[in-house]
Image: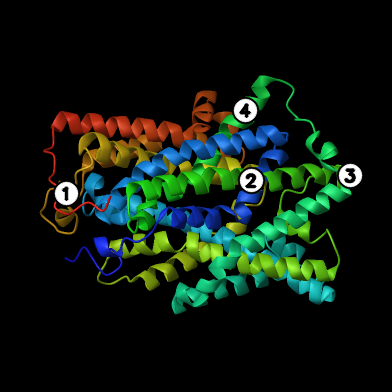
Amino acid sequence: MSLTNEDLAATPPEKRTWEMKHFAALWIGMAVCIPTYTMASGLIDQGMNWWQALLCVGLGNLIVLVPMVLNAHAGTKYGIPFPVFARASFGVMGANVPALLRALVACGWFGIQAWLGGQALWQLLLAMAPGLEGPLTSAGMKEAIGIHPGELLGFAVFWAMNLYFIVKGTESIKFLELYAAPFLIAVGLALLGWAWVKADGFGPILSQPSKFTDTGSFMAVFVPGLTAMVGFWATLSLNIPDFTRYARSQRDQVVGQALGLPGTMVLFSFIGVAVTSATPIIFGGETIWDPVKLLGRVGGPLVTLLAMAALSIATLSTNLAANVVSPANDFSNLAPSKISYKMGGIITAVIGAIIFPWKLIESSGGYIFTWLIGYSALLGPVAGIMVADYFLVRRRELSVEDLYRRGGQYEFSGGVNWKAMLALAIGVAVNVPGFLAEAVPGLKDSVPGFWRTLYTYAWFVGFLLSGALHYAFAALSAPPRSAARLEPGG
């Protein structure tokens, strides 16, 4: 059985050409996106003031930078992508489990970005033909599946655009990658300027008070908010080897990521925080946390036309870069000889559509407490196991040859490291009651408070618990250290 193909094979040293600036640019491009805005604006909608929200965003991104850099190390040293790296800890076949978990989360993000882009297209259509709003709005359909015909039309068209470029290859819009972040920065700054004018300066905006009356009520939102911030990039903290496999050195990937991620997230989040803080002043008490809906109300048809066109193009570019590379590799890992990168991308698009992504971002509470924290409960344990295995168990030494063959040291039992699977299962299971309390209507009161509180720390609990269990299981069985068989790339 083949365990490799062109996309999964280790990157040879001569092709590892990414410098510090490339990693900084990568993070600026991925961090400047609509979900970054909505993540920060959602904290304002939940009751925080501007500095509380920025503190939450900044601290969360500094925390997630740690597993990001740690998991990136193996990609740089051995030139291997995430699904192959996972074989060292989960087994050459068992690695399909964490790869699938990561891929399914990416499918959700793909769908969310497609929904946001579809919303922009819908607003763009209304700006050009306002008379369509009535005929293409159905209350019955909205009540049934949460979306009316006009929104569904926008989503379907934008989804099809994404699929076209997946099939044609993302190289076909490579030039757009250069302009996606600038587009969104320009739109964000325009919104910030509009808020400054309409609210009579930053004074009234930044003086908007917190809705929390005591420390307890604040922490009840801050802690899950912090977990959500970590969860936001918990996805990339796993599959970052997909990018760092091209790095020239460890210094390039570490410094590049440190320069590109936290600062960009805080700066672009500030726009979301400030603009959302201004909306109650401008709209008489109504807080609007969704930038697409806000842009539809800030100006005339021409403003809406230009803004939605920019948002559509930028969201298309961001979606293809951030939410196709990883799941395509992960699905390819299931059957390398049968599933190509392109087929993996198509699978991602289909799953992203059928999960009703508009439901995931329907409210700021659902977006933060159910979606972001919920999938962090899945990915935190995976990250903990991989970090513990690579740094504590194997001391950064891998046999690249054995990662690509059956019967080697990563065969374990039938290709699966069942001890790692047990550690993963326990790390996920402890957060299931709390997740159900948030996700299932009417269930919250029947779930004991301990489990609901534990869930607010979902990523941290899973990371530490599963990592510790994996290290303990490995120490008990005392596996031999492997010998590196490939010249390090950094």
Residue that label 1 marks: 410
Q: Check disc 4: other Cα within 10 Å, few if <14, some if 14-19, many if 20+.
A: few
Residue 465 drawn at (x, y percent): 36, 30
> Residue 48: which quarter of the image?
top right
Q: Is label 2 in a helix, a strand or a loop?
A: helix
Residue 370 in sight here: yes
Q: Check disc 2: other Cα within 10 Å, few if <14, some if 14-19, many if 20+.
A: some
Distance from disc 4 to disc 1, alpha carbons, whole Å, reads: 43 Å
Residue 323 drawn at (x, y percent): 48, 60
Distance from disc 2 to disc 1, alpha carbons, whole Å, reads: 43 Å
Residue that label 4 marks: 220
* Circle nearer the N terminus (1, 3): 3
Classify residue 350 as left or right of residue 36.
left
Q: Is label 1 in a helix, a strand or a loop?
A: loop
Callout 4–callout 3 Cβ contact below 8 Å = no
* Circle nearer the N terminus (2, 3): 3
Which numbered dot is residue 200? 3
Q: Relative to the observer, which residue lies in front, 422 or 476?
A: 476
> Residue 345: which quarter of the image?
bottom left
Residue 49 drawn at (x, y percent): 73, 34
- The amino acid type, in three-letter code, at marker 3 is Asp
Classify residue 59 as left or right of residue 122.
left
- The amino acid type, in three-letter code, at marker 2 is Leu
Residue 210 drawn at (x, y percent): 75, 30
Distance from disc 2 to disc 3, alpha carbons, whole Å, reads: 22 Å
Q: Is label 4 in a helix, a strand or a loop?
A: helix
Residue that label 2 marks: 267
Look at 42% across and 46% down and name the residue there: 237
* Circle nearer the N terminus (4, 2): 4
Distance from disc 4 to disc 2, alpha carbons, whole Å, reads: 25 Å
